[in-house]
Image (cartoon, rainbow, N blue to C red):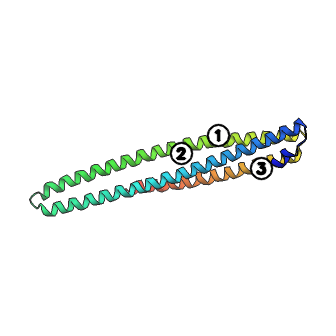
Amino acid sequence: MVVAALTWSQDPQFFAVIVLFSLIIGILAAFWFAYIARDMYKHEQQRMQERHAQERENILLNAEREKAHIVSERSKLQEQHARERERLLLEAEREKASIASESYRQQEKAIRKAHFQANFKVGAAFLVASAAGGIMIFSQLITIGMMVLIASGSGLAGYLARARHEHISQNKRLSADNIKLIEK
C-alpha cells in the first residue's frame, strides 16, 4: 500500500481504491486483535476461577481437619458436636451448590452476550468486505474485487467452522455437567 501510495498517479479513482482497501485491512486487523484480546481474557478468567475453587477446597479441607480434632479432644460433647457438624456440612453443600449454579448461570449469560456481540461485529465486517469487493468489481478492479470477496468468504467459512466446533464442545460439556448433577 505504501509503495502504491508513493507512486500513485493523480487519478482520484485510484486514490479512492487505495483508501478503501486500507480501511478494509484496518477494520479486519482491528477485529482480529479484538478476538485475540477477548480469548486471552477468557483464559485468564478461567484460570482465576480454577485457582479460586482450589483455595476454597483447601479452606474446607482445613476446616474439616480442625473439626475432627475438636471432636477427638472433647469426648463429653461428641454427640452435640456431630449434630452441629452435619448441619454445617449440609449448609455448606447447599451454599456451595447455590453459588456454583448462580456462577454457572452468570457465566453462560456473559458468554451468550459476548458471542452475540462478536457474531454481530464479524458479520458486519464480512458484509462490509463483501460490499467493498462488489464495488471494486463494478468499478473495473475485478482482480482486487475478487480477491477481497474470496478473502471475506474464506474468513467467514473459518469463523463459522470455529463457531460450530465451539457449539458442539459446549453441548458435550453441558451433557457431562447434567450427568454429574444426576449422579449427585
The Cα–Cα distance between marks 2 and 1, rounded to whole angstroms, is 14 Å
Task: Verify CB contact (< 8 Å) between mark 2 and mark 1.
Answer: no
Q: Position of residue 174 (x, y in %)?
A: 50, 52
Crowd tier of the residue under label 1, counting other residues whose Cα lies within 10 Å: few below 14, some 14–19, many 20 or above: few
Residue tagged by mark 3?
151
Residue tagged by mark 1?
120
The Cα–Cα distance between marks 3 and 2, rounded to whole angstroms, is 28 Å
Between discs 2 and 1, the one toward the N terminus: 2
Viewer can see residue 127: yes
Left or right of 87 in this view: 4: right
Residue tagged by mark 2?
111
Q: Position of residue 83 (x, y in %)?
A: 18, 53
Describe the element under mark 2 as helix, strand or loop: helix
Residue at (40%, 49%) from the top-left corner?
Answer: 100
Inspect the image, locate mark 1, and give the three-letter code of the amino acid beneath it: Phe
Describe the element under mark 1 as helix, strand or loop: helix
Between discs 1 and 3, the one toward the N terminus: 1
Residue at (30%, 60%) from the top-left corner?
Answer: 61
